[in-house]
Image (cartoon, helix red, strand yellow):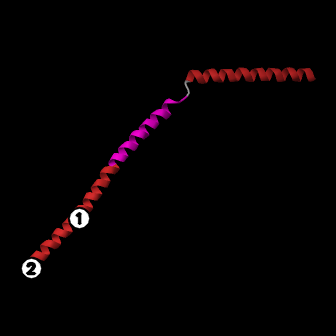
Amino acid sequence: MLDQTLLNWLIFTLGAIMSAILHTIWGAVRDLRAEDKAISQKLASIQILVAGDYIRKQEFDRVIDRLFVKLDSIEASLVSKQDKET
């Protein structure tokens, strides 16, 4: 009878230890899931922010047109200087 009681206490102790370990692991997994969800939401907001900040085609065309006008004026002034020197 003493052997059976000792075996029961040993099984109970091992079960309690395993239960505590599994409870700790389950809590860590739950925290990681919550953190993963938060990180995913932040990443999605960053992707939206990056995709929304591209230059618009009309603005790009306007800037390029201004750039070419300026380059044409520089070229014209260089040509006129070259004509004056020769």
Residue with the most extreme left position: 1
Residue for badge 2: 2
Residue for badge 1: 18
Quarter of the rendering containing residue 3: bottom left
Q: State how far apart marks 2 and 1 are (Cα).
A: 24 Å
Tell me the kind of residue under disc 1.
Met
Contact check, label 2 and label 1, Cβ < 8 Å: no
**Rendered location of residue 7, percent (x, y):** 13, 75
Instruction: Report the magenta stretch's main SS.
Output: helix
**Rendered location of residue 80, percent (x, y):** 86, 20
Q: For the point 43% across and 40% down, which residue is it?
A: 43
Q: Is residue 60 above or below residue 43?
A: above
Quarter of the rendering containing residue 82: top right
Residue with the most extreme bottom position: 2
User: Viewer-nearest of labels 2 and 1?
Assistant: 2
Crowding around mark 2 (Cα neighbors within 10 Å: few <14, some 14 to 19, many 20+) is few
Q: Nearer the viewer, residue 75 or 70?
A: 70
Q: For the point 50% across and 34% down, which residue is it?
A: 50
Q: Secondary structure at mark 2?
A: helix
Tell me the kind of residue under disc 2.
Leu
- Which residues lie in the magenta part? 33-54
